[in-house]
Image: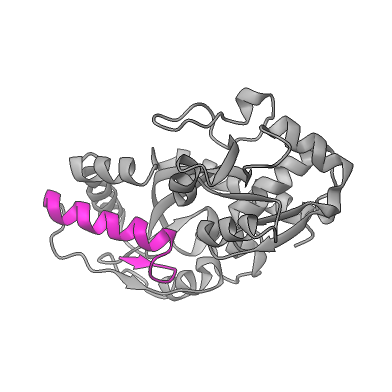
Amino acid sequence: MIAPAGAGGGWDSFVREQQQAMRLSGVARNAQVVNIPGAGGTIGLGRFSTMHGEASTIMATGSAMTGGIELNDSPVGFDDVTLLARMAEDYDVVIAPVDAPYDDIPGLLEAWKDNPSGFRWTGGSAGSLDHQVIARLAQEAGIDGRDITYIPKSGGGEAIQTLLSDTTDVASTGYNEVSDQIEAGRVKALGLTSPGPLDGVDVEPMVDQGVDVVMGNWRGMLAAPGITDEEKSELIAMLEETRNSEEWKDALQRNSWTDAWMTGEEFEDFLAEDQKNTAELLEELGL
């Protein structure tokens, strides 16, 4: 099982949670994890694309890889591997210091319109879902994406530090990365990018505030190119068995992930739309 990112990141935890669920549920007791980090997952993707017919290896993928392929002009893309399944999704939250003069997304957008380039945003790497969420909010506010002042950080923890030290004004980051800080009252949550309310999450979705921004950070699995249809079906069945295990359901709950199971043509169509939307947003950002 390849995590195309370093230890401790989102893909790494996604793959290791799968490994644990597979072992404990008996789906695959000898699953091993290998990290191949770099360039939004495209270093791992490039290496994986050369493993023709290797049905014993699978690799994580997701929103960040869609962005990585586009941003890095990667010579290797999803057509060079085998799609298996989308498995989970989580959502971004926009947070601000507790003394910020706005309490929701409409209030934030009104303040931002008054000073587009003066607002200092932070989140993950350039072109990441965090960055794309801000681009969508800019579209909703009628702000040119090239006027966004964006200071990328490596994760939600760093983003919070910049808010608390007044280095930035607003952050877009994964809810599960900052939920503890929100609940502790260290920062203020303004809105979620989910399509509706999430169980156990006391933050109002942006769509329920009249702002049409719904964006999920999806995660799924790929197989190597050149495997047989039978091998592909067996791998999908293995992932589905993992998905249905109590151990995986527990992992979803612990990580504030949402089940997002999708395979076959439906997954192919979803991915094509994701690539189109990502390319448009990155162009909007001038990337």
Image quarter where the C terminus lies is bottom right
Measured as percent of width and height from the top left, residue 74 is found at 61, 70
> Residue 254's image quarter?
top left
Question: Residue at the front extreme?
Answer: 99
Q: Nearer the viewer, residue 162 or 151?
A: 162
Q: Is residue 42 left or right of residue 6?
A: right
Question: Residue at the right extreme?
Answer: 114
Measured as percent of width and height from the top left, residue 258 is found at 40, 38
Q: Is residue 130 left or right of residue 58?
A: right
> Residue 215's image quarter?
top right
Q: Main secondary structure of the magenta part?
A: helix
Q: Which residues are magenta?
A: 1-26
Measured as percent of width and height from the top left, residue 91 is found at 51, 42
Q: How many marks?
A: 0
Which residue: 27% across, 54% down?
Answer: 18
Q: Nearer the viewer, residue 199 or 213?
A: 199
Q: Nearer the viewer, residue 49 or 8?
A: 8
Residue 285: within the magenta? no
Residue 10: within the magenta? yes
Residue 33 shows in this picture: yes
Q: Nearer the viewer, residue 151 or 229?
A: 151
Measured as percent of width and height from the top left, residue 55 is found at 28, 64
> Residue 232's image quarter?
bottom left
Which residue: 72% across, 50% down?
Answer: 281
Image quarter where the N terminus lies is bottom left
The answer to whether 23 is drawn above or below residue 193 in the figure is below
Residue 243 shows in this picture: no
